[in-house]
Image (cartoon, coloured by chain):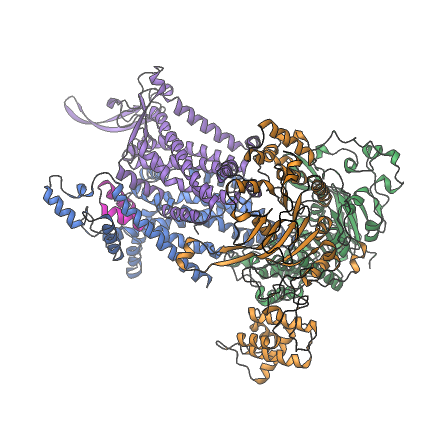
Amino acid sequence: MNWQRVWRSLRAEFGRSPMAKLGVVLILAVFLMAIFAPFLATTNPKAQDLSRANEPPVGFTDTTEDTRLVDGERQTVTVTTRGTLEYPLGTNQLGQDMYSRLLYGARTSLLVGLLGTAIAALAGVSVGIVAGYYGGRVDDGLMRFADVMLAFPALVLAIALIGLLGPRAVDIPDPFVAAGLVSDMPETTVLPLTVTLVVALVNWVWFARVARGEALSVREKNYVKASRSLGASDRRLMLKHVLPNSLTPILVLATVQVAVIILLESALSFLGFSGTTLSWGFDISQGRDLLATSWWISTMPGLAIVVTVIGINLVGDWLRDALDPDIEGESGGGMG
Amino acid sequence: MSDDVILRVSDLSTRFFTTDGQINAVESLSLEIEEGEVFGIVGESGSGKSVTARSLIRLIESPGRITSGTIDYRDEELAEAVREDYPEAVDGAFVDLLAIPEDVHRSLRGTAFSMIFQDPESSFNPSLTVGEQIAEAVEVQRRASSNPRSTRARTRSSAYSLRSYAAAAVLPGRGYVSSDSKDRAIELLQQVGIPDPEQRVDEYPHEYSGGMLQRAMVAQALAGEPDVLVADEPTTALDVTIQAQVLDILRDLQEETGMTILLITHNLGVIARMCDRVGVMYAGEIVERGSLGDVFDRPTHPYTQGLLGSIPDLDAAGGRLQPIGGNVPSLLDAEMGDRCYFADRCPKAMEECLEKPAEYPAEGTDDHAARCYLADHPYEASQALPEDYFEESEPP
Amino acid sequence: MSIDDLERTDEAAPSRGTGADAVGSDDALVEVRDLTKHYFEQDSLWDRLLGNELVAVRAVDGISFDVARGETLGLVGESGCGKSTAGETLLRLEEPTAGTVRFGGDPVFDLDGPALREFRRNAQIVFQDPFTSLDPRVTIGETIREALDIHGIGTREERNERVRDLLERVGLAAEHFERYPSEFSGGQRQRVGIARALAVEPDFLVLDEPTSALDVSVQAQILNLLADLQDDFGLTYLLISHDLSVIRHICDRVAVMYLGELVEVADVETLFEAPEHPYTEALLESVPRAETAERERDVDPLAGDVPSPRDPPSGCRFRTRCPKVIPPDDLEIDQTDYREIMFLRDRVEEREISLDVIAEEAGLPARDGGEFAFDERQRDRFVEQLRAQLLDVDLPGRHERTVDEALGLLADEEWAEAADALRAEYESVCERRVPELAGDHPVACHLKNPPEE
Amino acid sequence: MRLTRFLLRRTAQGILVVWGVITLVFLLRFITPGSTIDFVAPLDASPELRQRLAEDLGLNKPIYVQYADYIVNLLQLDMGNSLLKGRPASDVIFARLPATLELAIAATIVAILFSIPLGVISATRRHQPVDYGATGFSLIGISTPNFWLGIMLILIVGVNLGWLPTSRRIIGFGPALELLIFEGRTIGIQVWFEHILLPSITLGTYFTALITRLTRNGMLEELGQSYVEVTRAKGLPETLVKYKHVLRNTMIPIITVLGLQMGTLIGGAVITESVFNWPGLGTLIIDAINSRDWPLIQGSLIVIGVGFVVINIVVDALYMYFNPQVTFE
């Protein structure tokens, strides 16, 4: 594999582009947050403390009017709550620590984003390469099916599927907790299985389209013909020549898809179609009715999403500029 | 007439500043072109011949830049017009095209000189009709000539401007400035032998064959009735029978209008068919120049000799070819030293070639000159470098 | 694994099939008969459902020739004539539409299993564009070794050793094994392509424009290399090229292709010194020679473009451009005039005449509603104008009258009738009869082999 | 001629896609766990009642018969009765449709109005502050989840500043227009505008950002084509080179991507509606799913599928208009 060259152009572009550096830093930060969440978290993100509900982030004060019984009489008093370092990003209406929830939310987002992309890519690329390589009726059939798939907006289809199948989740034991390195943290990380499968299902078509387009053009390259004239089997041609030479645009697409899927996951959690409550989207929906009083509950997880997705998009731009693939959907294609 | 120099290029250097380093595409190039002649520049890929052509029209874009030299163009009216504002650009009847501002230069494009490009298929905007694109060129010329050739008028009068075309930008098929320019486009298409030009004028580039498109490009280049036509590999993308048609058209037009043609190609046959005088380019320099007879029949530079020896003869049964060894050199600055660039492929290279490249003899357009020590003194085998001299520094 | 293997292949395989016909030869390694390759457009599911008709692009339309053992056959033609498709189809890199190819007597299109693998070993191809013929992600050593890997020849070390030998044999260095194609120039890549083809010691190489992407100085190196390799390994070449000087330089025999068909086959001397097909003549005439006398050489370029292979002309496919198109026997007409009338006829048949514009130029009133409404005088003026614009020659009286009659029909916008009128008078044998490629010096032209009517 | 043939062909294709959509939607019911009758029948229904209900709804028939019935009914625009509302599902859906359409169209207009000029300016003033501003905006725009953006707009513009209403749709565009035309009162339009402004910004931001990016990158790429050099060589002023030649060709990839992104627009509409309590198809479909209102779910999905196909035909026609080379296979 000539990955040396790929690596070299990636490095050259990285050196040139401050935005690429920013992207990598952001992504690294989010990854570290997600992986080491049990160490970084100050409180168990699921632990509720109703006495400390709706506290503002550190540095902010919150003034609310409350009716209390003072000396046996109902009085309206003005309560001023000051944010404390104990809950640096404040708490929600259940008194859960927003900061710790943010860290664990990163785990959910990245898990769904990476796993969903991987499944979608695996399925889409296999189908796309085969269709593009053989062309003809196989290809025709696949593309017509893709048309039908694309006729459902991803989010709508995802809502329908999850709503009807019911959100199912899998508990993955947290290795740090299992090893006894930290205590008082959730013992498992919840992988929202239905959500992951559904986002993969609604997004594999993109991979299939790109892979197919690449395979269509690569199979016409003379080096493929030359190998065929040497007697190479279809399997060999696909694995040895077509797939490796289709990879760069697929790689760029996969990066962008991680961002798309993270956004999709957050939207699903926001609408309540999720298998876990430790999710940025879910937290945003929780804060929605408290906007007038506790703005931070919705704001903080939203910022986390934006930062993560910006990071991924910057990395995507970096790959695109460095590897210069010609991706359908950015420069060609159509629904024909 | 033929004694008049119309274009005088001296010491032209064009460089590209890439991330891999500096590429000296054209290096201290000097040449003179006479009015009404067909001057050919022949060279292999990477010799810098196309960059030379683009330098003449100032179409070099970042990361490239013309780093030195002058391109003097003889036009008394123009000289008169720009003398006041840009005295440093004017030398008698000559105007240095590199010393005038972009908008004045633009007003010369299409009218004073125009260009034919190599690949006709990618040289037309795919979403506009061929006729409209030719009519644009007509319109540019019409606006320019409706005013006297004064700089101010010319720059301001490039009034084929955005405003008059706001609608055309969005709405296809209604782009002509006037029916006059469309009529002229039809006339031009007719002139270059496009059958049924009245219908063809409204067709899109993809509806044309390659040969027809190249003819349409000739028509477009002629729209401004230019004094100098720069043709960059005008027939390379074409089949031989179509190439013959296009060359025929170019020859007829040249005879008819007496315009000057600078023909750039790698094809020695095309040079032989078209040109009065020839310059042979290698690694950014003109290594030999002279009349067609001088260069083809009495080549002095070993590169010219090698080039002529490399082509299989169509009219005689083949013996063994005498190719030039090695590959065309990279023009990266780091790899160029102060020596003859051809030395490492040259079968007659000598010690002195490695120390300092030969210079041209004193200027003079009629001369047959070569940038080689062998131009002055005959070759002696005893001076040659040992055969394996360059073996070690082998590319890549 | 040596040259001996190559020479052991069963020699003197008797040529079968239609071996007796004009293009056959006694010691044929490759026998191509009626090879046809059509591509189909509008072939998708939608087209089926919507009942769109298949459009056949007749890339190769029934060509027959032999390549004799040890010779170099040139296949020459302009772009789009189907020569590369022919090369790829006869190697079964494309599925043929019809026809047979025998390789050493074996029917190539019926082979499978070990026999097909054997064929794949014996017949190889070198491509035109050295930039797309090497996988950019594979080292050149691996590229060359791939054939050996596929056929499981030798141990890994033996294979690598063989690759290094090959690299040196084609003028590269053994150290280049680990390099990637991007580090090489066009000429060097082409050497890699040749080494790859030679790795499995084939008998037969299809060289598809092997030098057209290269500079002349490098082209000469490659041509010399190919000649040396042929001598050393006893190779048989099918050289596909548009460059006549390359063809002349290294071929023994030449087949000329036009629009999917062969028009002339001859040994190289005969073809270049005494070409018989008008297309071959025109082709030879068109090439500019690199010599000082070139300026004065009289060239009469072939007019027009190659017609579309979707709808090729009837009869002789070259007739729409042929300067020697044959007039009807009983017609007395100058050849130039006849050619001119035939051009006019094509335009009438294709309806490629803008009547409105011509009417306007004749100063006639624009059409009122749907039709022209000319009186007698106006109609004459229109015909006059049509003749002036559409014909470059003055016709003698009799022909002028016939043509004017047809142009008159045009004035009434009776396209079909106008075409009929012209056809009735001027129909050529070239459009009615397909010329056969026959004779000792096979030429597909009615001038050479007059058809029996 | 070209356009007519294309539209005919494209419509035929569209009908087949819609048929595929209908089939998938129909099958959706059978991959869902639990039998349909469980959702329909009251919890305490006797087996006999369940049996009768199933018969009424045709649930006992073989699947292909149900499928055929379903298609036949659909052809008569009969999507069954909404279990939730007890009215024909089609009535419910078509009553909600205008709200969604208004929102989607308003967002598209917002997007096109801002993005293309921004992208052009950005591309022609490369490496200048405007360019950095535009690329920064578009990066953030495509990275922001629109439901969160909506909430932030509500928080800032609605709650903190109190400038605009933050939810519901008081009046439709149609009635508002009638009010204006027949009674000369602008209040309707004004209320309509106030209510749709935030939702349309929410939905439109992603597209504005996306198209800005595409326009910029597309123009930069197009500027590298060789015809641009030719156009300059013939002496055309730079403004014309850029706006007449380059921008037009840049539209081609933009339209392509727009077509591909229409799904995102519709999905975005669903979630935007949910944020702003906008009474459109999106909120309807979420309610329907939550209450397993099958006829409504199926009907909405089909309407969305049809809408998507129609939009794509329009987009393709636009594509064709800008790109004379297209012959569509």
Answer with left or right where residue B334 lies relative to residue B200. Answer: right
Q: Position of residue C449 (x, y in %)?
A: 66, 66
Colour of the chain lettered D: blue
Camera-nearest residue between D53 and D317: D53
In the figure, A115 relative to A202: above or below?
A: above
Quarter of the image where one finds residue A55: top left
The hue of chain B in the figure is green
| Magenta segment main secondary structure | helix
Task: Give the purple chain's letter.
Answer: A
- Give the camera-side residue of C399 and B303: C399
Q: Between B152 and B67, which is closer to the camera in this rendering? A: B67
**Left or right of residue B342: residue D63:** left
Q: Position of residue A288 (x, y in %)?
A: 29, 35
Residue D1 locus on image (x, y percent): 46, 64
In the rendered image, the vertical position of residue C40 relative to residue A74, given as above or below: below
Q: Is residue A268 visible?
A: yes
Residue C127, magenta (yes or no): no
In the rendered image, what is the letter of the chain coloured orange? C
Q: Is residue D296 magenta?
A: yes
The answer to whether one can see residue D92 in this image is: no
Choose between B360 and A160: the one closer to the eye: A160
Q: Which residue, as the protein is rendered here, is positioned at the far bottom?
A: C376
Which portion, as a residue range, is magenta?
D281-304
The quarter in which the N terminus of chain C is drawn is: top right
The C terminus of chain C: image quadrant: bottom right
Horizontally, residue A136 falls left or right of residue C244, namely left
Relative to B279, say whether C282 is above or below.
below
Residue D271 horizontal/vertical position (percent)? 32, 41
Image quadrant in which you'd find residue A269? top left
